[in-house]
Amino acid sequence: IKMCADLSRTQRNLLVCERSSFLDEKNRVSSQMEQLRFNYKVSVLLPEYDSAPSHLESILNSFSSFYLIKQLPLYELLDKDFLQSAVYQGSVYGLSFRTRIDEDNCVALMPNGKHHLVFSLDKDAFETLGLEGRPSRSNRTSSRYEVTVDLRDGSMAPGGRSYLRLRRALMSHLKLQMDFLISHHPGGGASLRPLLSRCDWLERRPEVSRRGLSRLVRPALRSCDPHDLLEWIGAVDAAVSLENSSSDFLSTLTCLEPEATVSRAMSMSACGLLLPQDLQHLVEELRCYLQQAQTDSWASVTVHGFTDSPVSWGDGGRDILTGGHDLYNLLMFPDHTYRLHLATGAQKTCPP
Amino acid sequence: MEEAQVYTKVPRDLVRHLGVEPHNIPKAAKFTEAHLKQCTQQPSRLDVKSMLTHKAVLLGYSQPKRDTTRNRKKAKGLNARQKRMMKVFHIKPDHQRYELFLPLHQLWRQYVLDLCGGLKPTANPQIVQQKLLKADLHGAIITVVRSKCPSYVGTTGILMQEFKHVFKIITKEDQVKVIPKRNSVFSVEMDSFVSHIYGNKMEFRASERSAKKFKVKGTIDL
């Protein structure tokens, strides 16, 4: 029985696999993609091209820019004008930057849903701040606490009782200040101006890079095991050689069940605070592009979430025990079919 | 009549015969008195005075009785039930106003200043701390700084009553708040000295706290 208790504390990695078609009316790819709100990196793998189709590169370059605010005092997020222009209109994405989920206090600002402001606090911060919250883990010795605030609730209107209490807590009980990444869809900088005008901010664009690959051995993409597929895609993305030659001691990874060899391939990636809406636009463009390609062509899009985000899929909270991060991979084929894999390392959440 | 015959003089012709000498009346009276005294003397063993001299006398054996009238004057304390019924520690609602307690706060400030010998900025915090541990806190302005229960954090007010496990404070909005001492950290501010009190270690009645020795601990977690 003791062993079972220990096992329950180990990391859980969950992979949800789905195989369907875009033409099927029950497909929920867009809503599933929207559930992972804070995306750090997207990488696209396309076969048979040595130079990026300029169209696709321009799409990656057209991702919305985001803003990095240095040492934002968190009570500024409760400013009336900012709430009016950005939060109430929906679709502001904010995340604390360079705060580790197991050591520092993390904050996430979500676009909509029940939890707008999510704090992940350590014990001292939680006891000093004085906001209603709950421990992250259900066993008694948890040392991280989660506080969620619904900014659309009646008493959270500026001047309401909970609003004043939250403001007083962030201003006088514990003055939380941290670097903050923020982005808004579709308004961009204009909606964020009430906040940005009072802070020290930098505008950043997602960092785009591309890489050409040659002689890539690929498995049977339609039918291979999901774990093997993800391992292969990850190895290609990390530029790990899959040949397992006798002179190479660094890696013994091989491509299991190789089906064919691709002579040329292109890998493109973008890093930054990426919005789900931009990613959906990218997927749409890739689909159009695949229509004009050959029948055995394919395209793979992998999206990684932030490792230190206090929010996992949907509205689920994240915890120290989560070592892995959330990601999903969409493998598309010209006949409108796709394979979707959603992974999470969180204890309690499940990808949609 | 017989008495008169006793008192008559002895006739002259009997005097020569008996060989007695007749006295006159005063002489005879004296002689009779002395003679009677001699005859009726008590034996020496029944003489009270001789019994008492040179002897220790043991009086009766009994417990020395305490003076009960003195004890009856001291009033007996009330037990807890009587206290609750009489509501001795209950403050009436019309007395629950913040302004009424401000003079108490001024009194407390004066008391602490006297206790610490004037709180100069150069005073040693250790000494002030030691004194504050044994000081009475009624009338201090107390703020909850940290607490396991988040809703207590931030409440501030003047301390009205200190019990074994709770503080009763009155806030500026004339609200009486009862705050348990356990799992909370309170701060007492006195001019520029801020002192933090860990409630977990302070669960004593105010009267017992003045005699309590506190151990020195590095850091305390709630």
Image (cartoon, coloured by chain):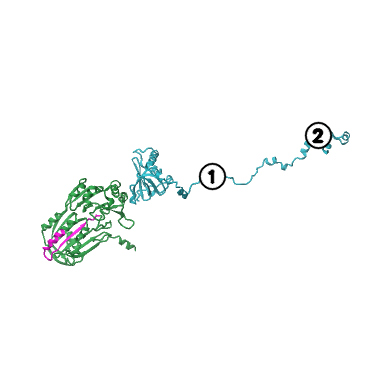
Q: Residue furthest front?
A: B94
Chain on which label 2 sits: B
Find residue B55 and report its image quarter.
top right
The amino acid at mark 1 is Arg
Residue A341 point in image, percent of width and height? 21, 62
Q: The magenta stretch spans which residues?
A: A282-309
Image quadrant for the N terminus of chain B? top right
Q: Disc 2 vs disc 1: which is toward the camera?
A: 1
Q: Please indicate whether residue A69 sits to the left or right of residue B72 in the image.
A: left
Q: Is residue B101 above or below residue A28?
A: above
* Kind of residue at badge 2: Ala
Q: Which residue is mark 2?
A: B28
Q: Dot 1: few (<14), some (14–19), or many (≥20) neighbours within 10 Å?
A: few
Task: Let me know if residue A192 is in the magenta part.
Answer: no
Q: Colour of chain B?
A: cyan
Chain A tint in image: green
Tell me the residue that label 1 is attached to.
B72
Give the answer, above or below, for where A53 lies relative to B147: below
Q: Can residue A252 be spotted in the picture? A: no
Whether residue A289 appears in magenta in the rendering, the answer is yes
Horizontal and vertical percent position of residue A178? 24, 49
Secondary structure under tag 1 reads: helix
Q: Tag 2's secondary structure?
A: helix
Query: Chain under label 1?
Result: B
